[in-house]
Amino acid sequence: MTNSQIKALVALVFLILVVVLAIQGQAPSKEWLHSFSWVVTGVSLSLLLWERWLWSWWGFGFLAKRPDLRGTWRGSILSDWEDPTTKQRRDPVEIYFVIRQTFSTLDIRLFSPESASQSLSAEIVTDSVGLHTIALTYLNTPDALRLEQSPISHGGAILGIRGNHLIRQLDGKYWTDRKTVGQMLLTARSSSYCHDFSQAREKFLGD
């Protein structure tokens, strides 16, 4: 929940209380307003703690019902792209997902040996039986020396979230506006947040 949403909620609660008091023929006293200010502070702090941390704590899962995907994931990507010279498809490419998450937001960065991608929108979608899926659109920016061969592009992905309390795998398909499609599979995970491909690879090789 954003600061604006918290303020709007507090304002709405205050307005309702004032209306109720007016209907009862009462006016807010100084003591009442002082007590209400502490209530507002407590509610705002509780909502902030929930948004940032509490939703992912053990014991709160029955309230959140939101999978915790935070950290760096290692996996591979297999594309249908063919080399125009050899007419051969590439072998699977090593990739890393870095996922930052709060209760209401999801940010995903993808690093490969030749490019980096940033999510433009990312949502966790839950179906009627409680299965979770990531719906993602992203901007892919190749390394500077590869821009001529591989220009900046946009794409999307649908990834299944495998596991119940402990998420063990992300997998699914992706597509790009360069008319390519492929598969993604991510199975190893670190709680650390890596900032580029080299750091992520070093982290997993070190572990």
Image (cartoon, rainbow, N blue to C red):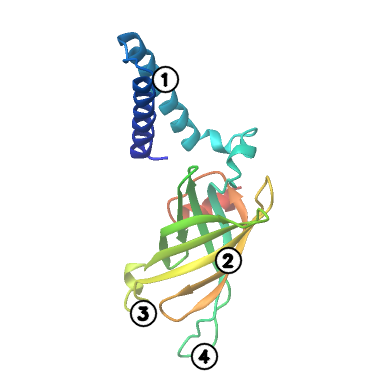
- Please state which amino acid type lies under the numbered disc 4: Lys
Count neighbours of disc 4 (C-alpha within 10 A) and say few if under 14, some if 14 to 19, many if 20 or more: few
Q: Secondary structure at mark 4?
A: loop
Whether residue 87 is situated above or below residue 120 in the rendered picture: below
- Expressed as whole percent of the image width and height from the top left, the position of residue 77 reads 55, 69
What residue does disc 2 label?
Answer: 76
Whether residue 184 is situated above or below residue 59 in the rendered picture: below
The disc placed on residue 87 is 4
Indicate left or right for 200 with 61 as reference: left
- Please state which amino acid type lies under the numbered disc 1: Val
Give the camera-side residue of 55 and 179: 55
Q: CA distance from mark 3 to mark 1?
A: 59 Å
Residue at 55 percent of width and 75 percent of height: 182
Do we see residue 185 in this rendering? no
Q: CA distance from mark 1 to mark 2?
A: 49 Å
- Expressed as whole percent of the image width and height from the top left, the position of residue 61 reads 63, 38
Q: CA distance from mark 2 to mark 3?
A: 22 Å
What residue does disc 1 label?
Answer: 39
Whether residue 32 is situated above or below residue 20 in the rendered picture: above
The disc placed on residue 24 is none
- Expressed as whole percent of the image width and height from the top left, the position of residue 168 reads 66, 53
Residue at 50 percent of width and 33 percent of height: 50
